[in-house]
Amino acid sequence: MSKVYLVAGNANDDVRSVGTKIEALWNAAGLAKLFAPRDLVAVKIHVGEPGTKTFVPAGVVKHWVERVRATGATPFLTDTAVLYKSPRADAVGHMKVARDHGFTFELAGAEFFPADGLTGADEIEVRLEGGNHFETVAIASGIAHARSMLVVSHATGHLATGFGGALKNLGMGCCSRKGKLRQHSGQKPHVEAGACTACGTCAQWCPSDAIEVTDVAIINSDKCIGCGECIAACRDEAVQFDWAVNGKELQERIAEHAAAVVHSKPDRIGYVTVAQRITKDCDCMGLAQSSLLEDIGILASCDPVAIDSAVMSLVQQRAGKGIEQLSGRRHDGTVQLIHAEKLGVGSRDFELVPVNG
Ligand code: SF4
Ligand code: SF4
């Protein structure tokens, strides 16, 4: 059983009171022991897709960054490139969105640095024991090289997994473009002929010579290894892939990527989940969403499975139904927790410890 610490509060709390609560939570959860002087600490955040309003704000992240810095470590804010059409699909656009949403040194206390490089391809293959789907997974190099981490998550429902919290932030959020494609069941991209200008850039970048360009680019799926380079290379957004695969297998694949990250930094990762403005979909949705239930507060733990388990349980208690039902999804979000527990990532059993802030 793992301890999960909870300080009650809502998203409208004033900045000073949030700071007091976060300090109390930090101390109660004993997160300082995870960081050492001169550590490069990846503070894994989600800067929010343009249009969304409910991501964890820079002013809240700043309080956590200050606590990490006080240990003598060097925190940086980070995230990875997305696969879909978005300014967050490459580092230049991602850094602009981060800046637009306040994730600057002045407002958030640290610089934002995409962990997977310019196009989402900077990665390190990390070994995984006991997985159903992978023996190695592709983790963003900036995550792999960081000595320790603070994973700051916003609890939400999720279109494809039912629930998004710490495990999703670790698994999908900390891997390279190739890792994301693999999680989406090894999807192979295809070219939308109407959008293709036959410029040939994708073929130049394809490591498998899987693309032939005549009037349009054509991908040979037998040769394609699903690395996603062509998606990043195409500036005409002609390379697409099928998002249809989801559910149980997707959650297991996410849990396996999360396991590789966790096992690469034993006793060096802390988890903070903001259970406020809990929305139907995650912060990748580029639209303003309303809350599904009243704000709960902020949770902290050294166990990502326990913190996700606690959030799901608290939502059930407060709303009288699970987050999947609240958000109208048919996917059972506990699949990722069960698989992560099996991989030794943490425990679904938790003791909830209230903290006065
Ligand atoms: S995903 Fe990678 S291997 Fe497949 S076509 Fe694109 S660049 Fe080539
Ligand atoms: S980079 Fe895009 S536009 Fe250029 S050939 Fe490839 S798919 Fe077509």
Image: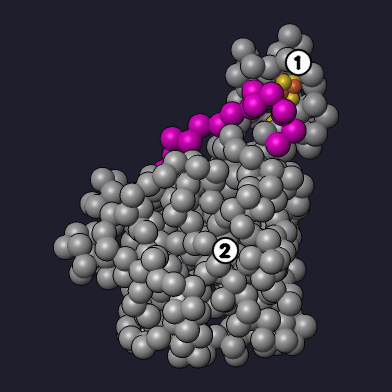
Identify the residue shown where x is 72% and y is 86%. 72
Check the picture and name the quadrant holding the N terminus: bottom left
The tag on residue 58 is 2
On residue 198, the disc is 1
Find numbered disc 1 in the image and state the secondary structure of the residue it sits on: loop
Say whether residue 125 is visible.
no
Asked whether 78 falls inside the magenta stretch, the response is no
Q: Position of residue 200 (x, y in %)?
A: 80, 21
Question: Ligand 1, what quadrant?
Answer: top right
**Image quadrant containing the C terminus:** bottom left
> Type of residue at label 1?
Ala
- Seen at 47% across and 47% down, the residue is 52
Which SS does the magenta portion mostly show?
A: loop
> Taking 258 as reference, is 97 left or right?
right
Residue 315 in sight here = yes
Disc 1 crowd rating (10 Å Cα; few below 14, some 14-19, many 20+) is some
Q: How many other residues sit within 10 Å of disc 2, few (<14), some (14-19) or many (≥20)? A: many
Callout 2: CB less than 8 Å from ligand 1: no
Q: In the image, what residue type sits under mark 2? A: Ala
Closer to the eye: label 1 or 2: 2
Q: Position of residue 128 (x, y in %)?
A: 60, 65
Asked if disc 1 and disc 2 are in contact, CB closer than 8 Å, the reply is: no
Question: Residue 230: which quarter of the image?
Answer: top right
x, y percentage for residue 75?
Answer: 69, 74
Is 148 in front, or is 155?
Answer: 155
Decide: is 280 above or below 319. Answer: above
In the image, taking residue 300 as reference, residue 330 lies left or right, namely: left
| Magenta segment | 232-246
Is disc 1's CB within 8 Å of ligand 2? yes
Q: Quadrant of residue 39?
A: bottom right
Is residue 240 rendered magenta in the image?
Answer: yes
